[in-house]
Structures are given as C-alpha cells and as structure tokens.
Amino acid sequence: MRLSEKFNEALIFAGKLHATQTRKASEIPYLAHLLGVTSIVLEYGGDEEEAMAALLHDAVEDQGGVATLEEIRRCFGERVAEIVAGCTDTTTTPKPPWRERKEAYIAHIPTASASIRLVSCADKLYNSLSIVKDYRLVGEEVWKRFKGGKEGTLWYYRALVEAFYKAETTALVQELDRVVCELERLVS
C-alpha cells in the first residue's frame, strides 16, 4: 500500500497539534508515540484511514476536544473522525475521574468497530511496551506517572485485554496480552 498526500497532511497536522507535548515524565516528543502507534496499525494490516486515525488518536483528548474532532472530520473525513472519537475517553475539561473514564472506555471496546479496536489496541500495545521498558529502567518509580498507580494501571491493561478478546481474537490482541502478561510477571 502506498500512503497518499492525505496521510502526509495528517502527519503534519498531528505534528503541529502535539509539537510542545512530551511523553509522561520524559523529554521524548509526543510525536514518537503517535508514530509508534501508526507503525503498529500499518504492520497489523491497517489501511490509510486507520493509519491517519492512529496519528490523530489523542488529538481530541489532549488538544482541543470537540472542536479538534470537527476539524479532523472536515480535513480527513468521517471515517477517520469516527475512529478518533472511538479512541477518545473524554472530550470534557476537566476530565471526569480516572476510574470512571477507564471503565466506560473498556465497556465500549467489545462493541466498537474493528477499525476503532485496531487503533485502540495498537495504542495500548505501544503504551504497555513503554511501561515494560520504563519499569526495567526505573522500577517502581514508573507507577508515579499514572493516575491509577500500580494497581489501577495493571487492572486497566488486563481489563482492556479481556475487552478486546470479547470482540475477537486477533494477532494484535494476542500480542497485547503477551506484553501485559510480561508486565504482570515483572512486577509480581
């Protein structure tokens, strides 16, 4: 598959939106996360619109809410906007309580479209790989980065795996499960 100029536009749009943002407790540009998730989506068979949604999956939540979603819809189309919306756990500021948001997000996964699940699962795989890497580097300090702390974060990723399996078993879901199992073994 060849990526079109529209993909390049989404890449530039994401780069501008997240230009000053870094990953939690690091100096790593946030764009690294977006590119990593996009890579996973493409490697697991995603199409161009799913890849564009992967680039933009955090835009609504982190960079402007509903107004940003409407701009994504206008610039990149309804399908990309629907995928991004399905990967967003809130559009309100301030955000609702962490556990409430996560429970609602988990609950919608089994009935979400295959495209939403692909981008969401790629995001969770990238994040869980990052947690494993960071745990190896800084140990228990890693949990200070997360609102749910150690117990909440481990609960969230295990519950996500179960929610993805309720919808279907894919190679991507199985890989997420393997990484979450590795994380659980590391910290036990």
Image (cartoon, grey):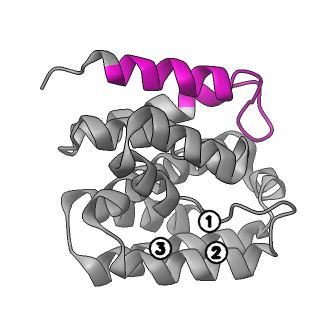
Amino acid at dot 1: Asp
Q: Residue at x 48, y 38 (%)?
A: 74
Write down the quadrant of residue 118 in the picture.
bottom left
Q: Badge 2: how crowded within 10 Å, few (<14), some, or many (20+)?
A: some
Earlier sequence position, callout 1 versus callout 2: 1
Q: Residue at x 20, y 72 (%)?
A: 169
Expressed as whole percent of the image width and height from the top left, the position of residue 41 reads: 31, 42
Q: Residue at x 52, y 54 (%)?
A: 128
Dot 2: element: helix
Earlier sequence position, callout 3 versus callout 1: 1
Q: Badge 1: how crowded within 10 Å, few (<14), some, or many (20+)?
A: many
Residue nearest the viewer, comparing 110 with 70: 70
Q: Is residue 40 magenta?
A: no
Say whether residue 129 is left or right of residue 67. left
Disc 1 versus disc 2: distance between alpha carbons? 7 Å
Q: Is residue 113 visible?
A: yes
Disc 2 versus disc 3: distance between alpha carbons? 9 Å
Amino acid at dot 3: Leu
What residue does disc 2 label? 102
Q: Which residues are magenta?
A: 6-32
Viewer-side label of 2, 3: 2
Q: Residue at x 36, y 72 (%)?
A: 112
From the viewer's perspective, is residue 161 above or below residue 116?
below
What residue does disc 3 label? 160
Dot 1: element: loop
Expressed as whole percent of the image width and height from the top left, the position of residue 116 reads: 37, 60
Residue nearest the viewer, comparing 108 with 127: 108
What residue does disc 1 label? 89
Dot 3: element: helix
From the viewer's perspective, is residue 158 above or below residue 128?
below
Amino acid at dot 2: Lys
Earlier sequence position, callout 2 versus callout 3: 2
